[in-house]
Amino acid sequence: MSQESSSYLRRLGTWDAAMIVIGGVIGAGIFRTPATLAERTSSGTQLLVLWAIGGLLTLAGVLSYAELGARRPQAGGSYIYLREAFGQLPAFLFGWTMALINYPGSVAAVATTFADYFCTALGLSAQYVKPVASGAIAFIVGINLFGIRAGAWVQNIFTVLKLAAIALLVVVGVVLAQGHLGLALATDASRQVPSGALIGALLPVLFTYGGFHYLNDLAGEVREPQRTLPRALGLGMAGVMTAYVLANFAYLAGLGHAGLAASHAPAADLMQKLFGPRGATLIALGIACSTFGYCNIAIAGGARVLQTMGADGMFFSAVGRIERQSRAPQVALATLGAWAIVLTLSGSFGQLLDYTTVGEWLAHACSIATLFWYRRHFAEPSPYRVPFYPWLPLLFVLTVLGVIGATAVHNPRDAGMSLVIIACGIPAYYGWRWLERSSA
């Protein structure tokens, strides 16, 4: 067992943990994805049903992660589950793909989105986007160096602000509806979509629901984890589903299905329709808050995975250290933040994210699959057990594999490169093991 299980302090309560779930899921997607989904559906009713179905499918994964977290309430999340169930190589491949590529790539991408909206709201030119994004990453790392309580304090504030932005959208949508909501929900005769195509329309929905796993990365710092983790995951995901369905209701009410399908920035269009340019500026600040909060979660969670790898001898030993006073993985935080800043300044994060999307969802499927291993090898009951086992975990795994298959069909190049990146981790793993033995 890694050293972090006895080194981290359990300081996060249910409220903090639920805010982490909400903050890890809600980023910039809900402010953009609905327009994409409207293009792929023929009515507002179809659109809302897809958001509800996507939320319920994701909930199956969330409940499965709740049992995994209750069984192994340690920092590192999926890395721990894969290491125990399938061995060090699969765990290393997860860390190789996620902690070294996907997490910092996500941080770089979302920090750039934050800076874009922040600069737009303040009237700054585009030349400030990269410096602002890099400064935001450095600021988040600096806050988290003081420990999980400092990071949670920042997270709670920005999660409340992002929920306030969504609540504002809902109010504006209802005001603009003026009794014409039925037109938004009606079928658009000019936009007939085959039923089979609706399965493909679920892809962006599921991607927008992603990010619920970050709490498991931080499980070593959750108080009474067997009780708090399942409760926080359930409450957090319920909050996300409610926010997403209401936000889409607002878009349909204010813009109509056809207007939403034609929009490139539905949140800004909705606000501008009622408040003019000031409304667009206000929602830009709301989106900036939402994306900033996501970066905080991704950095904190990714650093714990890196630290666990370092403690296991699967990465530099210095990265595995936990600072004694703050109980924070300071070297891991600095390493992840520095790499994210490099990706931000280079602008190379977009391609990296495209290449690792399949790997991210494959990691989710493999992580849930470890639940079957735990149930078989450990007879004692878990403090929390996923309901309707084995059907809910199986549903999630099959859904994720379907998402991966559909992604491979639509983007074979990105899916192929994702598998190549994962495969490159195999010689890296054996090379690292050889270096470790040589230096011993």
Image (tube, rainbow, N blue to C red):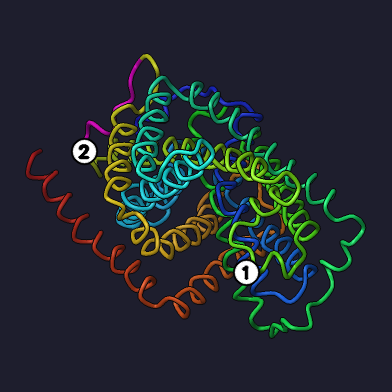
x, y percent for residue 274: 76, 47
Q: As shown in the figure, which amino acid type bears the numbered disc 2?
A: Phe
Which mark is in front, 1 or 2? 1
Most distant residue in the left direction:
438
Q: Which span of residues is magenta-colored?
A: 316-324
Say whether residue 123 is left or right of residue 304.
Answer: right
Mark sitting on residue 316: 2
Report the Cα–Cα distance between label 1 and label 2. 40 Å
**Disc 2 on helix, strand or loop?**
loop
**Disc 1 on helix, strand or loop?**
helix
Look at mark 1 in the image and give the residue it sits on: 202
Residue shown at 37% from the left, 25% from the top = 142
**Badge 1, how many Cα within 10 Å: few under 14, some, many 20+?**
some
In the image, 69 versus 86, the foreground residue is: 69
Say whether residue 29 is left or right of residue 236.
Answer: left
Q: As shown in the figure, which amino acid type bears the numbered disc 1?
A: Leu
x, y percent for residue 12: 57, 26
**Badge 2, how many Cα within 10 Å: few under 14, some, many 20+?**
some
Res 216 visible? no
Establish if 248 lies above or below 49: above
Residue shown at 71% from the left, 41% from the top = 235
Which image quarter: residue 86?
A: bottom left
x, y percent for residue 256: 77, 64
x, y percent for residue 66: 61, 45
Which mark is first along the chain, 2 or 1? 1
Q: Which quadrant holds the C terminus? A: top left
* Residue 247 part of the magenta-drawn span: no
Residue shown at 38% from the left, 30% from the top = 141
